[in-house]
Amino acid sequence: MSNKFNYDAIFSKKSSDNPINIVSHAKYDFAVAYPAPETLPMDGLIQSLATAMDTNSEKVSNEMAYYPHILGSVELREFTSQKLRDERGFIVDKDQIVLTNGSGEAIGLVIQALTNPGDIVLAEEFVYMGTLNQFRKFGAEVVGIKIDDKGIIPDLLDKQISDMITSGRKPKYLYTIPEHQNPTGSSLPKSRREEILNIAHKYDLPILEDDCYVDLRYESVPEPAFRALDDSGIVIYVASFSKLLAPGLRLGYFTGPDELIRRSLDFRVGSGPNQFAAIAIDGYLRNNQESHKNNFNPLLKEKYQYMNKSLVENFSDFGAEWSNPEGGCYIWLKMPEGCDISSIRDKVFSDGVGYIAGTNFEADASGRIGHNYARLCFAFESPEKNRDGIKLLADLFKKYRVAN
């Protein structure tokens, strides 16, 4: 037998030998980022596929026999165009919509089209770690923006950009999750969005708007999208079907100026996303979107209420604070200054409760501001497990002397 081949001198400089991340689950899993299996409309999606085949089997078979259109399914793009008009308040043609393998691919394509190594990108000081990983992968320097319980603070954003420009560090664009932000759960009021748009124009700063949680709202109505408030092309809009239906379907989308779309697609490898999934989503949502939301969001609200009530009962004496979202999947827990719930995360996980420590969401990766924060997903577990898991979490924080 020959000696084992050694690739050490062959690997590209860009490659890195990272461990394969296999997701594990605690007994009470508040670390996940998706809804519970009981909310997934599997029967409806399967029926939609069957109906499509029964209605026009030749057309469906022909579509499945070829690679998908580079923009993705025409029918689903038509539906998405109508959905954006009716629900998010802006008009965009189907040919200005790009379907992607989840919103993560959409964001990655746009990042590559806009970003050179060393470019500075602004984001909320705590923001979704998946996007942070993509920024860093493609060489961007991420700078965090101060936020409060309503999201980005326009006055501070304006001053921060001005100071950065004065020091020769002009940011290139702004990434934000304005609706039910991940991880904080905040939603930007319309008035702040308008102020931020004025700031964006003042500094020629495009806005990459990640609206992937907008369908998950159980209080009031969503705020208008940045894209609905500005049709100049300064806003690039990204969203997803994954959170509303099933993350495993892996279908998201983005829209923006024509040149931005063309340049983003230059980084796509292969054709458009899964046609089979697109047929199922299109057929199901055309007939069932509102009924699905009417079933899904009340359950989401109940799960939130159980977790929130348990936090009140078990964490109030700690001096802890937490967000009160009107939708989405997450509560943002803040323990008092000096508490370190980052370093004990693995121990707590082994004892039965999973959460994501705040250090994972730090935009600038300083490691200085997130130790006393945790993201708690209430969407995955049952209401009862949300209640019981939070009680156990409080007991474990006492066990590891995080809190008295």
Image (tube, grey):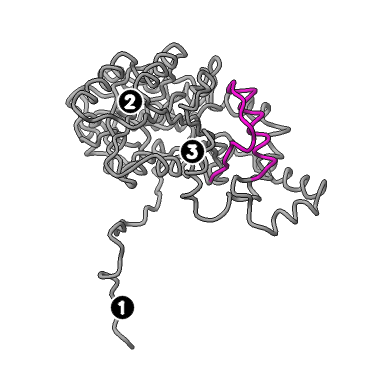
* Up/down of 341 relative to 51, above or below: above
Relative to the observer, which residue lies in front, 18 or 310?
A: 18
First reached walking from the N terminus: tag 3 or tag 2? 3
Q: Nearer the viewer, mark 2 or mark 1?
A: 1
Specify whether 297 is left or right of 60: left
Relative to the observer, which residue lies in front, 60 or 387?
A: 60
Label disc, if present, on residue 306 of the rendered structure:
none
Residue shown at 23% from the left, 25% from the top? 164
Give the CA distance from mark 1 to mark 3.
43 Å
Counting other residues with Cα less than 10 Å from the Cα at mark 1, is it few (<14), some (14-19), or many (20 or more)? Answer: few
Looking at numbered disc 1 in the image, what kind of residue is underneath it? Phe
Q: Is residue 234 visible?
A: yes
Label disc, if present, on residue 260 of the rendered structure:
3
Is residue 49 within the magenta segment? no
First reached walking from the N terminus: tag 1 or tag 3? 1
Q: Quadrant of the N terminus?
A: bottom left
* Up/down of 276 relative to 174, above or below: below
Looking at numbered disc 3 in the image, what kind of residue is underneath it? Leu
Q: Position of residue 2 (x, y in %)?
A: 32, 86
Counting other residues with Cα less than 10 Å from the Cα at mark 3, is it few (<14), some (14-19), or many (20 or more)? Answer: some
Residue shown at 43% from the left, 31% from the top? 208
Residue shown at 41% from the left, 28% from the top? 206
Mark 2, residue position: 333
Q: Nearer the viewer, mark 3 or mark 2?
A: 3
Magenta residues (range): 73-100
Counting other residues with Cα less than 10 Å from the Cα at mark 2, is it few (<14), some (14-19), or many (20 or more)? Answer: many
Label disc, if present, on residue 5 of the rendered structure:
1
Residue shown at 40% from the left, 23% from the top? 310
